[in-house]
Image (cartoon, rainbow, N blue to C red):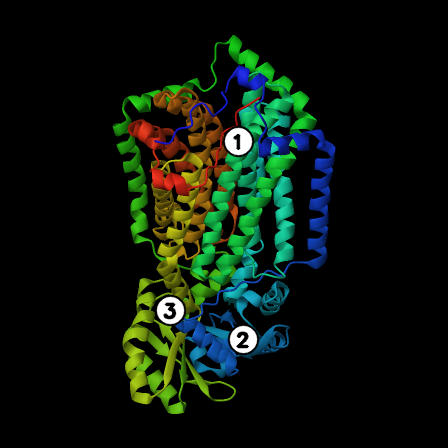
Amino acid sequence: MSSTRGSTATTGPAAGRVPPRAGLFGRLAGWSQRRRWGALLLWVLLVVAITAGAQAAGSDYRNDFSLPGTDSQAAADLLTEHGSLQAGDSVQIVVHSPGGLDGVRGRVEPMLERVRGLPGVADVRSPYADASAVSRERTIGYATVTLDGKAEEAAAEDVTRIIDTAQAAETDGLRVELGGEAIRAVAESEGGSAEGAGMLAALVVLVLLFGSLVAAALPLLTAVFAVGGAVGLITLASHVFTVADFTPPIMMLVGLGVGVDYALLIFYRYRHELIAGADRGSAAQIALDAAGRTVFFAGCTVIIALLGLVALGLGALQGVALAVALTVLTTMAASLTLLPALLAVFGGRIERHVRKRAAKAESKGKVEGARWRAMASAVQRRPLPALLVAVAALLVLSAPALDLRLGFADAGNDDPSTTSRQAYDLLAEGFGPGFSGPLVVVAQGGQDAAQQLRTTLTGTDGIAAATPPLPSRDREVFTVIAFPETSPQDEGTTDLVHTLREDVLPPLADRTGGTYLVGGPTAATQDFADTVSARIPLFVAIVVGLSALLLAAVFRSLLIPVKAALLNLLSIAAALGVITAVFQYGWFGVQPGPIEAFIPVMIFAIVFGLSMDYEVFLVSRIHEEWERTGDHGRAVREGVAATGRVITAAAAIMIVVFAAFILSPSRMLQQFGLGLAVAIALDAVVIRCLIVPAVMQMLGRRAWWLPAPLARLLPKVALERPSGP
């Protein structure tokens, strides 16, 4: 067993009055406090300069959903190479007239001509020029507006102009709705007050915790500065790296949650040292040397987990990972340099308030952490039952995740009031449920190979209809659009894509000598989901492995990193189970559909890292007490008593901030917010309050065991304050 008992300074009033020798973070706090106004001015100037530069340069967010090596990407590249109109994404203008479309032709045709002349439009195909674009009853039809690029590249103002121009033709006898990914993207970009709601909720929790608006404002102010600087940096970075357009809301809310969390951990230790008798300067030094180290190592774990997304090799996720990792790094810097300066500026008012509340509590006989200490004692008396009940509850919540199906939401999941959802419903009514998710099958090998492709597709089970071959400009490549009998999100459509690629098209290619590729948005969605599923094991191994090594170095223990990894995986599985039940099964009235392919890996990266915050904060206090007394049972009780309140408050802030994602009109952000909020709640309440004390009690002194060979290999990294005068 590795032990350095006696190497750590004691806590308590005596330790609070005479600070130990300052470590790196303590010296950094001392510098920030001595030059408080300079530190504040430096942060203000940095944020203002970055923001001004970002506003002057503007953003260049762009989505990269390319999947090298997949059929859908090969099909898209082939269409682009040969100048096919199908290389660009399209928008559908759906027209509905109960009296028949022939009677409204005089309004529809001029409207389509106006759309044809709009920026960003490559071509418009009228329903009157294509019999297959009109329903059998001739009451519903659609015009295909081919864009001059991919939907994610279309300018929002150009798409809005298409919507306004088309809907201007509506009359009592003519209804016009628009569908397509570009239309949905514009609708999703309009809503959301998540950041404001998250900040307000965080402020309420902090006021309830500290009973002072000034004390509550400091962690929030630190987070706002950090996020403000990070947003500007990412805006500038979008000109160099590929950063998805859905990155800013994710990084802002994650940044607010993490920023408040980190500042709160440091501030709470500062408050503890003031109550223990330290002066303001010594309290800040001790807080930064102890909680500041915890924040640093926990932040490093978050960054490691996020950068693990790079291993997936998916362009859209790499940009998000880098952006959020930079946000976490900025919040760490603000917590370690800006917060000490703010404590120096407002320290007098905060100290008076803290000592007044402490004296009031003492006069009433209240002991801080008494309830948490009693709860830990109860768990220690019966650790096995507590462990079994808690693990069973998490396993029950995790069960739906076994049925998790990855994909992407389509217009069928949109709000019924949106034009994209109404266009989707009209097309399904007029042409069948699979019409909104066609498969774009590309043929290379001549007209005959393309014609045989259409014949084969028409006779394939699961395909309702197939268009005649559409030639590219150089007539080297032909496209056949196949309409499944099932909706885009239906498992039958997924099976159809695999059947075509594995069973139907290979024999056809052998007969004709042609090359066939299944592409289009529906197939690309399935390729993305398959790619993510295939690479998740490598991603999990990298993140868990690196995080476990970091924890082993910090705590000089083998079993604690293993315990932390297993418990984090359990809380993430439970969160994914809840998401599956709500969004895939349709609980609580939610429109059922697949789970967004981004969600599992994003939640895993962020939750795994954030869970380590609480793990490091709790176990470091247990380790500190263990090093001081050598009494393992007492160390567990005192660690829970010292951290229970602040971990719960920090988790509450995280929960309300992440739950604010649910206010977003984006289904992906709703799933993201629910998953993060559930995972943090389970981690703080079930794992930190029940499972960790139970496991630590059962492990006893073995918790700090580290094999000698591994001890020699790992660097020695201390979280506690160094000893000495």
Amino acid, disc 3: Gly
Task: Tell me where residue 172 appears, x and y as whole percent.
Answer: 55, 66
| Residue drawn where x is 49% and y is 39% of the image | 298
User: Which residue is under mark 1?
Assistant: 291
The answer for how far apart the CA atoms under marks 1 and 2 are is: 57 Å
The answer for how far apart the CA atoms under marks 2 and 3 are is: 20 Å
Please identify the quadrant where the N terminus is shown.
top left
Task: Tell me where residue 688 appears, x and y as whole percent.
Answer: 39, 32
User: Which residue is under mark 2?
Assistant: 146
Task: Tell me where residue 417 appears, x and y as whole percent.
Answer: 50, 56
| Residue drawn where x is 58% and y is 54% of the image | 190
**Is the residue marked by circle 3 packed among few (<14), some (14-19), or many (20+) residues within 10 Å?**
many
Residue 698 is left or right of residue 516, and the answer is left
Of circles 3 and 1, which is in front?
1
| Image position of 55 with respect to 460: above or below | above
- Residue 88 appears in the rendering: yes
Q: Secondary structure at mark 2?
A: strand
- Taking depth in this image into account, of 704 and 569 the one nearest to the observer is 704
Amino acid, disc 1: Ala
Looking at marks 2 and 3 on the same chain, the residue that comes earlier in the sequence is marked by: 2
Q: Secondary structure at mark 3?
A: loop
The answer for how far apart the CA atoms under marks 3 and 1 are is: 56 Å
Amino acid, disc 2: Thr
User: Which residue is under mark 3?
Assistant: 434
**Is the residue marked by circle 1 packed among few (<14), some (14-19), or many (20+) residues within 10 Å?**
many
- Taking depth in this image into account, of 137 and 627 the one nearest to the observer is 627
The quarter of the displayed image where residue 424 is located = bottom left
